[in-house]
Image (cartoon, rainbow, N blue to C red):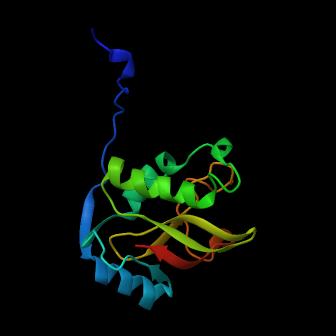
Amino acid sequence: MCFSFFKKKEETVIPANIVLEITRNDFINTLRDRYNIEPISLSNPLDSSLKLTTKEELDRVAPDLVYPADWYVDELWDCEEYGLQAQLDAGRKFKFSARLCLGDMDLGYHGFLMTLDSDLNLWLLEPNAGFPYAGMWFKSGENGYLSKKVFI
């Protein structure tokens, strides 16, 4: 008996072209020294390096890191879950490193996605489709977002 109806249809995904791989310590130091973002880190980290791509590749995959606004359920599935889902899909689908970032925005303390490009420029992404700028990378300070902490 075949249970093919349980199989998830495979989607065609083109991974990002990895241009730079940096150590976890270099990633943390870059965020702290250049962008004043503090790590929320594990005492025994599992990732020793992070894979970075170009801004062009980030732009290509950005729309696929946005999720329906109706997934939002206050205190159950809210901003940090959107950010974590985007972090997971960046790695699983597109093979580059992005992380949940926490900081301030017009509506208060907020979770969203962040990464560095291969030139070590910081980029933020709102993964909740309910925001007009969702799915477009922007710099810290734009759209009212100020990065403070990163989950690494």
Name of the residue lying farthest toward the top:
1
Task: Name the foreground residue: 120 vs 48.
Answer: 48
Q: Is residue 27 above or below residue 50?
A: below
Name the residue: 56% across, 54% down. 82
Name the residue: 26% across, 75% down. 22
Residue 79: image quadrant is: bottom right
- Please provide percent x and percent y for residue 77: 62, 51
Q: Quadrant of the N terminus?
A: top left
Task: Name the foreground residue: 9 vs 145.
Answer: 9
- Please provide percent x and percent y for residue 113: 51, 63
Name the residue: 68% across, 49% down. 73
Left/right of residue 11 with respect to residue 20 in the rendered view: right
Q: Is residue 62 above or below residue 14?
A: below
Residue 98: image quadrant is: bottom left
- Please provide percent x and percent y for residue 54: 35, 64
Name the residue: 42% across, 91% down. 33
- Please provide percent x and percent y for residue 131: 68, 54
